[in-house]
C-alpha cells in the first residue's frame, strides 16, 4: 500500500455526512468583520467566463497567507483575487489555493517560468482548465473491519453493489498481521456512489465506516471542479505527516 493510501487510512478521507459538511464549508463565502461575505471568494468561484485567468496553486507552505499569494503572483499580471483552501475543522491551510488573473496573459507568464518558490518552498501552479477533466473515483476505504474477516466474505458483501476489481488487505509491518481496514476498488464509479449512500455497512461481523479513497490529484480536481462524487461529498486530500 502506498504512503498516500496509508494517510487516507489514518482518517484523511471523508464519509458521506462529514463530506457534505466539508463541502458546505468550502462552498460558503468567507466572512469578514461584521459577518459580511468576502468578495474575494465570490470572485474566485463566480462565472465560467473567467476560466482563462484562473490558476490552481499547489504545494503551498502552511504558513503562506493570501497576501503572500497575491504579492507573488502580481509580478506576472493583475491579480483580481486569490484564496487559500482551509481545513473546516482546524482552520489551517490545506496547502493549496486559487488565483484569478484579470487577463489570461498572467497565466501564460506564470507557466513560462520553470520553477516557482514562495516562502522558501517550491510551489506548483497549474492552469485551472487543466483540472477540469476529472478522474473517476472507484476506490473506497473500509474502516472498523475485523482483521479476522476473510477476504471472500468482504468480496461477497461488496459485490452486491457491483463488480469488484480488487480487495486490498493492508498488513502491519511490525506485527505482520492484518490491519483493521481495507480498500475496495470497483470497476465502475457508479458502484462507489451506491456504496456511499450509507455511511456504515455490516461486513461480516463488523460495523464498518465507508469513506472515499482519493489520490492527491483526484482530490484537487474535485475541489476545483466543484463536482461531488457521492451525495455532494468530497474526500480530503492526504496530508504529510
Image (cartoon, helix red, strand yellow):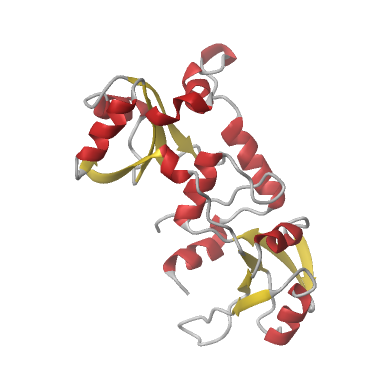
Is 37 above or below relative to 10? above
User: For this rendering, which residue is in front, 49 or 25?
Assistant: 49
Which picture quadrant has residue 200?
A: bottom right
Query: Looking at the image, which residue is at 77% across and 68% down?
Result: 161
Pinpoint residue 241: horizontal percent, then vertical percent.
40, 59
Which picture quadrant has residue 239?
A: bottom left
Query: Looking at the image, which residue is at 24% across and 45% down?
Result: 121
Pinpoint residue 165: horizontal percent, then vertical percent.
63, 76
Is 216 above or below relative to 158? above
Pinpoint residue 62: horizontal percent, then vertical percent.
36, 42
**Total labels drawn:** 0
User: For this rendering, which residue is in front, 116 or 187?
Assistant: 187
- Residue 119 is left or right of residue 157, and the answer is left
User: For this rendering, which residue is in front, 134 or 200?
Assistant: 134
The answer to whether residue 171 is seen in the rendering is yes
- Residue 105 is left or right of residue 29, and the answer is left
Pinpoint residue 25: horizontal percent, then vertical percent.
60, 35
The answer to whether residue 94 is seen in the rendering is no
Query: Looking at the image, which residue is at 20% across and 44% down?
Result: 115
Is 41 above or below relative to 111? above
Q: Name the residue at the top extreme.
A: 34
Query: Looking at the image, which residue is at 31% across and 32% down?
Result: 107
Amino acid at each position: 500500500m502506498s504512503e498516500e493510501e496509508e494517510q487516507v487510512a489514518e482518517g484523511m478521507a471523508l464519509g458521506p455526512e462529514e463530506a457534505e459538511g466539508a463541502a458546505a464549508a468550502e462552498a460558503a463565502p468567507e466572512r469578514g468583520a461584521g459577518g459580511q461575505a468576502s468578495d474575494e471568494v465570490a470572485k474566485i468561484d463566480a462565472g465560467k467566463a473567467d476560466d482563462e485567468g484562473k490558476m490552481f496553486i499547489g504545494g503551498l507552505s502552511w504558513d503562506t497567507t493570501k497576501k503572500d499569494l497575491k504579492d507573488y503572483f502580481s509580478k506576472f499580471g493583475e491579480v483580481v483575487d486569490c484564496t487559500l483552501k482551509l481545513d473546516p475543522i482546524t482552520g489551517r491551510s490545506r496547502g493549496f489555493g486559487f488565483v484569478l488573473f484579470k487577463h489570461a496573459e498572467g497565466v501564460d507568464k506564470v507557466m513560462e517560468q520553470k520553477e516557482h518558490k514562495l516562502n522558501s518552498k517550491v510551489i506548483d501552479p497549474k492552469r485551472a482548465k487543466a483540472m477540469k477533466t476529472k478522474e473517476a473515483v472507484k476506490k473506497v476505504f473500509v474502516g472498523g473491519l475485523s482483521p479476522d474477516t476473510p477476504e471472500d466474505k468482504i468480496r461477497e458483501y461488496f459485490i452486491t453493489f457491483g463488480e469488484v476489481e480488487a480487495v486490498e488487505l493492508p498488513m502491519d509491518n511490525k506485527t505482520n498481521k492484518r490491519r483493521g481496514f481495507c480498500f475496495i476498488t470497483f470497476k465502475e464509479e457508479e458502484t462507489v456512489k451506491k456504496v456511499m449512500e450509507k455511511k456504515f455497512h455490516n461486513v461480516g461481523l463488523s460495523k464498518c465506516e465507508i469513506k472515499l479513497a482519493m489520490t492527491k490529484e483526484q482530490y484537487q480536481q474535485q475541489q476545483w471542479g466543484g463536482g461531488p462524487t457521492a451525495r455532494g461529498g468530497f474526500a480530503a486530500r492526504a496530508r504529510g505527516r
